[in-house]
Amino acid sequence: MLTEHSSARRQWIHESIRRIEADGNRSADTHLFSVPLPQDWGIDLYLKDESTHRTGSLKHRLARSLFLYALVNGDIHEDSTIVEASSGSTAVSEAYFASLLGLKFIAVMAKTTSPEKIALIENYGGTCAFVESPGEVYAKAAELAEATGGHYMDQFTFAERATDWRGNNNIANSIFDQMRLEPHPIPAWIVVGAGTGGTSATIGRYLRYHRHATNLAVVDPENSVFYSSWAGTESPSSQSGSRIEGIGRARLEPSFVPGVIDAMIQVPDRASIAAMQHLKSLTGIAAGPSTGTNLWGVWGIIANMLENGERGSVVTLLCDPGERYTCTYYDDEWLASKGLAPRDEVARIENFLATGTW
Ligand SMILES: *Cc1c(COP(=O)(O)O)cnc(C)c1O
């Protein structure tokens, strides 16, 4: 027999899903910008601008998927506190959805998280709990969820399975839709980074399921174990954690799916910053550092295509906006203090665009 209690719970779940769907229904898709390249190359580059989501990053998609997944699984209720381990962007987006559903939200983050992100989480009514080192976030989040009787969202486990990779409004679906009228509608390459690995898993599975010829490249920063685990080489011993916010992990995350990746590219941190700075000077677009990592990978791939006389299109992501990093990656003194100030990397990109030689 149905109890009154269980039917009230079911009603709350229905209403919560309606709120999330209605929010999505009121939202527009993100833009796919064309980035100018020398015409005679016959290669087109596109930037999917994920910074224009309501909560400013590609984590808006993930947070939405994780909330829907937890709701349909019966994992969250009217009185649940939502807890998440995050390097910041996911927490910003989850704080937004928690507030949409009237739920308490706690973000567990390393104490080095940028003040701009902390302010955004608090703006959406979330609270922040800090740990000394990034490796401590998982245990602390589980502990807080336990103590509050809440739900640990656990993006690093569930990102790969919360999104429907077959395509109904996922990022891959949107990219292919928006490419339809382009000269090369099926990209030769899609280039993304990996934090949870959720985006690469969704795109890689989508490509295979739809039998597209597109290759998926994943770029990986210093101090991350993703590259070595994919390549089957020894992991970096450093436990210092990634210096590129949003991507690169010191732990091999369960939601990272190596089998769907066609190529991985290691990108030095200074090169990521250089490519981020170069994008700003080329297009006026200020993006976060993980977008720079994507672009450094893109320049290498395009150089390869040129060398092999290939024509086609390449798509990558603008993951989040530079305004989140005015006190960090957009501050020259901060960059110098972290040893991240580019040397000749910006000139190398400029020279490549002028001569086609990488
Ligand atoms: C999370 C994140 C990524 C990587 O996306 P995943 O789907 O988690 O692998 C890249 N850039 C930024 C800014 C992010 O927050």
Image: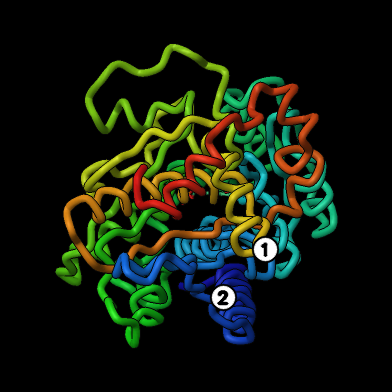
Q: Residue at x 58, y 79 (%)?
A: 24
Distance between the Cα atoms at labels 1 and 2?
38 Å
Disc 2 crowd rating (10 Å Cα; few below 14, some 14-19, many 20+) is: some
Q: Quadrant of the C terminus?
A: top left
Q: Which residue is mark 2?
A: 17
**Residue identified by numbered label 1:** 284
Residue 297: x, y in percent? 39, 45
**Is residue 51 rendered to the left or right of residue 350?**
right
Q: Residue furthest front?
A: 355
Whichever of callouts 1 and 2 sits on the residue coming sooner in the sequence is 2
Residue 226 against residue 297 in the figure, above or below: above
Residue at 61% across / 30% down in the picture? 137
Does residue 148 show up? yes
**Outermost residue toward the top in this view:** 237
**Disc 2 on helix, strand or loop?**
helix
State yes or no: Cβ of the residue under disc 1 lies below 8 Å from any atom of ligand 1.
no
For the residue marked with disc 1, what is the amino acid? Gly
Q: Which mark is residue 52?
A: none
Residue 94 visible somewhere in the drawing: no
Question: Left or right of 192: which side holds 18?
Answer: right
Q: Nearer the viewer, residue 206 or 282?
A: 282
Q: Residue 342: image x %, image y %?
A: 61, 32
Q: Position of residue 142 (x, y in %)?
A: 59, 34
Tag 1: Cα neighbours inside 10 Å, few (<14), some, or many (≥20)?
Answer: few
Q: Is 79 in front, or is 276?
A: 276
CB of mark 2 near ligand 1 (< 8 Å)? no
* Whole-percent x, y for residue 154 in the image: 52, 43
In the drawing, does residue 208 fall left or right of residue 127? left
